[in-house]
Image (cartoon, rainbow, N blue to C red):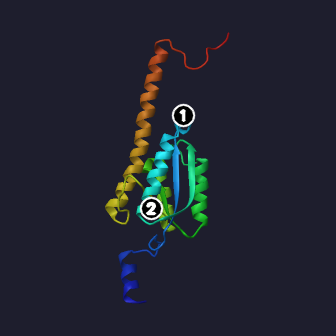
């Protein structure tokens, strides 16, 4: 065992794969609702920023995923899972580019956990609009905060929506179709 290997073992440095030297990337875009997808402005904006980011960083985009409406409050989304399967099968993918971290996941620690699993395979999740250095402890923490904050934002929206619905029910407003009978 050479001196560097001894130091790495002592320091807890892993030999985990790194994206360094690899330039292949995939782009993942999504919106939450069909109305947003029909509008398409958000999807095209996300794509534009992700492609500009890839070009600026000299990354080669080899595949595109998403481009549809899937809520990110869970990570069982069809296009998301298709992308995860794709990058896990390929050994040459170094990056998943998203417009912002909430486009990747809004499930909090679950999204952070998926990001960590990918990182162990040498795949970095990077945001075109929230550039942080994920090679530092501060950058890794900040990325996790983005994932956790996205879940918090979902929970706050849900709470506001339910509060409003309860008030409407208390005032006699019936949600949906009026029942027969």
The residue sitting at 52% across, 46% down in the picture is: 30
Q: Is 22 located above or below residue 143 in the figure?
A: below
User: Which element carries disc 1, helix, strand or loop?
Assistant: helix
Question: In the orientation shown, which residue stands out farthest toward the bottom?
Answer: 2
Q: Mark 2 or mark 1, which has the lower sequence index?
A: 1
| Residue 3 falls left or right of residue 172 | left
Viewer-side label of 2, 1: 2
Relative depth, front residue between 126 and 13:
126
Q: Which of 86 and 115 is in front in this view?
A: 86
Q: Residues within 10 Å of mark 2 (few under 14, many from 20)?
A: few
Residue of label 1: 35
**Quarter holding residue 6:** bottom left
Is residue 105 visible to us here?
no
Q: Where is residue 177 in the image (x, y as percent from the top left)?
A: 61, 17
Residue located 37% across and 66% down the image: 135
C-alpha separation, residue under disc 2 versus residue under disc 1? 30 Å
Q: Which mark is residue 55?
A: 2
């Amino acid at each position: 065992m050479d001196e560097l290997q001894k130091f790495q073992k002592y320091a807890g440095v892993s030999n985990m794969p790194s994206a360094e030297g690899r330039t292949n990337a995939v782009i993942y875009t999504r919106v939450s609702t069909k109305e947003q997808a029909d509008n398409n402005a958000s999807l095209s904006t996300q794509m534009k920023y992700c492609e500009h980011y890839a070009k600026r960083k000299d990354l080669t985009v080899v595949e595109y995923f998403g481009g549809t409406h899937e809520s990110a409050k869970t990570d069982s989304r069809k296009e998301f899972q298709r992308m995860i399967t794709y990058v896990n099968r390929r050994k040459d993918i170094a990056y998943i580019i998203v417009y912002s971290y909430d486009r990747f996941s809004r499930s909090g620690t679950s999204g952070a956990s998926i990001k960590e699993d990918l990182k162990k395979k040498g795949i970095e999740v990077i945001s075109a609009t929230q550039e942080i250095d994920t090679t530092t402890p501060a950058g890794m923490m900040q990325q996790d905060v983005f994932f956790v904050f996205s879940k918090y934002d979902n929970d706050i929206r849900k709470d506001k929506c339910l509060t409003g619905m309860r008030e409407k029910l208390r005032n006699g407003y019936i949600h949906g179709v009026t029942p027969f009978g």
